[in-house]
Amino acid sequence: MKYTRFAHDRKLKLKEVCELLQSEDGALWYQTVTDTYILLYNDTVTNKERIRFTIAHELGHYVLKHNEKTEKTI
């Protein structure tokens, strides 16, 4: 999901999304209520290669199960 959509849906500013997710690039967000993940990326980044890298990086966290090695949730 794009940061701008995430911000719009939650009535947040882009800066607030970056602060909430602790990243200006992207994040893998775990939703405890639905036991699902949302891959978020900053669509305001102009470098498309950077966006692709960020998406691949966040998918890597999921595939390598890094989420299971931390207690951190949002």
Image: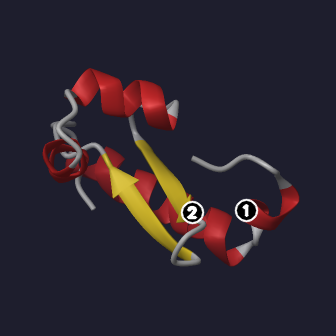
CB atoms of marks 1 and 2 within 8 Å: yes
Residue depicted at x 63% and y 71%: 62
Asked which quadrant contains residue 52, the reply is bottom left
The one nearer the camera, 10 or 49, is 10
Mark 2 crowd level (few <14, some 14–19, many ≥20, 10 Å Cα)? some
Count of numbered circles in the view: 2
Whether residue 44 sits left or right of residue 29 in the image: it is left
Asked which quadrant contains residue 45, the reply is top left
Identify whether 27 is placed above or below 58: above
Whether residue 68 sits left or right of residue 41 in the image: it is right
Q: Determine which residue is flagged by label 2.
A: 30
Identify whether 52 is placed above or below 25: below
Whether residue 16 sits left or right of residue 2 in the image: it is right
Q: Earlier in the sequence, mark 1 or mark 2?
A: 2
Residue depicted at x 32% and y 25%: 16
Q: Determine which residue is flagged by label 1.
A: 67
Asked which quadrant contains residue 7, the reply is top left
What whole-number distance in Å separates the C-alpha atoms at marks 1 and 2? 8 Å
Quadrant (top left, top right, bottom left, bottom right) of the N terminus: bottom left
In the image, farthest residue toward the right: 69
**Amino acid of disc 2:** Tyr
Identify whether 5 is placed above or below 42: below
Residue depicted at x 31% and y 51%: 51
**Amino acid of disc 1:** Asn
- The label nearer to you, 1 versus 2, is 2
In percent of width and height, residue 44 lies at 16, 37
In percent of width and height, residue 33 lies at 55, 70
Give the colour scheme of this rendering: secondary structure
